Amino acid sequence: MMSQTRQALFESDLAFLILDVRQGVTVADEKLAEYLKGEGIKNYPNLKNVVLLGNKAEHSFLGDISNEVYQLGFGDPILISAEHNEGLVDLYDKLRECIPESYIVEAREKYEKRLEKHESLRTQKWKELKSLEKEAGEDWNLKEWERVYDELNHPENSDYDSDSEVDLQKTLVNPEDFELSPESAKKSRTIQMSIVGRPNVGKSSLINSILESDRVITDSKAGTTRDSVSINYVYNGRKIKLVDTAGLYKRSKGVLNEMIEDEVHRAIKYSHVVVFMFDASEGICPSELDLARKVINEGRVLIAVGNKWDKVTKDLRPKFVDYYSDMFFRKISLKGLHIVLTSASTKYNIRNLLNEMLKLYDAWNSRVSTGLLNRWLDSFKKVQNLPSEHGSLLKIKYITQIKARPPTFYVFVNDKSLMKENYYKNFSNSLAEEFKMNGVPIRIIFRDKHLKAKKIHSPGFNVKKVSKLRTSGIGMMKKESKKNKPM
Ligand SMILES: Nc1nc2c(ncn2[C@@H]2O[C@H](COP(=O)(O)OP(=O)(O)OP(=O)(O)O)[C@@H](O)[C@H]2O)c(=O)[nH]1
Ligand SMILES: [Mg+2]
């Protein structure tokens, strides 16, 4: 635990030293304070501030122990009650003081740049669509398109950080360019990668194996990791934040399990890439797959990792590979889902996993130009017979990418109730195949003139009811995906 504390201090700009004011200053507090004042500060180059907090101080003041507290040498403590949310305003004020002005200025500049990029991308697309609408000689409800565009693209988040996007037009012409140059990779956004799965499958061991150090605690007892732990790591010049999460017991109830569940779901939501880990030597139970589906519904990159591969004997391996491929193919409707078999103990396939992750992450970030997309659409329509119902034929007029992360496409059609499940599958699979997005949860929004309401299609939802949806507009997604919010 001490070595983890040291590691955390090493990565920190600011530390809180927290006392229990009800208990008073203990010998351990004194030792820690001594350490932080002396050797500590020297050892941790980033650590610029240590702020003293007096916790459990609801409605109280320091009273008798004030002398001992000042002796610690960190000045006035900020009195808080973590349990009752008291004293937090003072804490925030202090935090604000500790953030250098340059950071605030930089953040503001970045935001303004994003806003500019948002505006220019939107204007460019709008113009493009307007001229195509003219060419086609019909009205496409571009106001509606614009509304959805603004809803899905938030300039507040860093989607617009230019270097994190991949220009697919270039990469298709020259596939070697698919790797970002080391320079732009350095500037690009940190990739958030969480590892989720049942207890004891080896999530923490995977982190240690990647880092080649015992950074997080692992144990043969299930339930070792209780809180998510995040660790910064650089691989091939790319910044990655690895998030180890607590194992989810699918069937058990109770407050702790609910808290873990919330935390894991939050980790998925804030991740770009999620490693869904299972124990390849034991198999997967269907309920575990709910978690994998959740990742896809949230629009995050999913990589299925079967760990403890070293425990599967060589003669059984081909059978296991078939079994898992079949299981994922049937239960998770994501074409090209990547299943990687690893051993955190022997480090088998760990590099492959990271390489695969980077490729998928780049594909998830990519934007395809409207021109390329419609060229693909023309050839797709030539080979696939368009579905029809009661003499009406589906017409797919135009496609444009409205958002990256995950790649989201907006498709103008004459009447989307004519879309059939099989046709939709072929459509999205061919789109993903063409633009190297296999294994990435792409989303497709079909729009016709009938509807005002919002509808987002993503892999993993049920398209069977499609023909009943003519007036309701939405409904192709599972209930839970209505909650989905774009990042
Ligand atoms: N044979 C083998 N054992 C492994 C492998 N990975 C992890 N283990 C062992 O499995 C046990 C659990 O590993 P952890 O990394 O703590 O598992 P976890 O998923 O983080 O577990 P929780 O924190 O409880 O959710 C430990 O005894 C590890 O040594 C592997 O690839 N092969
Ligand atoms: Mg763990």
Image: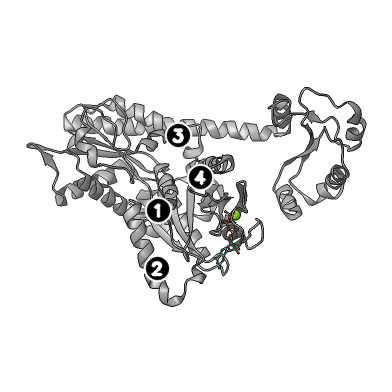
When the figure is inspected, residue 136 is found, relative to residue 249, above or below; the finding is above
- Type of the residue with mark 3: Lys
- At 23% from the left and 33% from the top, the residue drawn is 132
When the figure is inspected, residue 85 is found, relative to residue 423, above or below; the finding is above
Q: Earlier in the sequence, mark 2 or mark 3?
A: 3
Q: Which residue is mark 3?
A: 117
Residue 212 figure quarter: bottom right
- Type of the residue with mark 4: Ser
When the figure is inspected, residue 159 is found, relative to residue 358, above or below; the finding is above
Near-viewer residue (258 or 207) = 258
Q: Is mark 3 within 8 Å of ligand 2?
A: no
Determine whether label 1 and label 4 are within 8 Å by CB.
Answer: no
Near-viewer residue (185 or 231) = 231
Residue density around tag 4, few if under 14, some if 14–19, many if 20 or more, within 10 Å: many
Residue density around tag 2, few if under 14, some if 14–19, many if 20 or more, within 10 Å: some
Circle 3 — which element? helix
Residue 351: horizontal and vertical position, in percent?
Answer: 52, 64
Q: How is the image coloured?
A: one colour
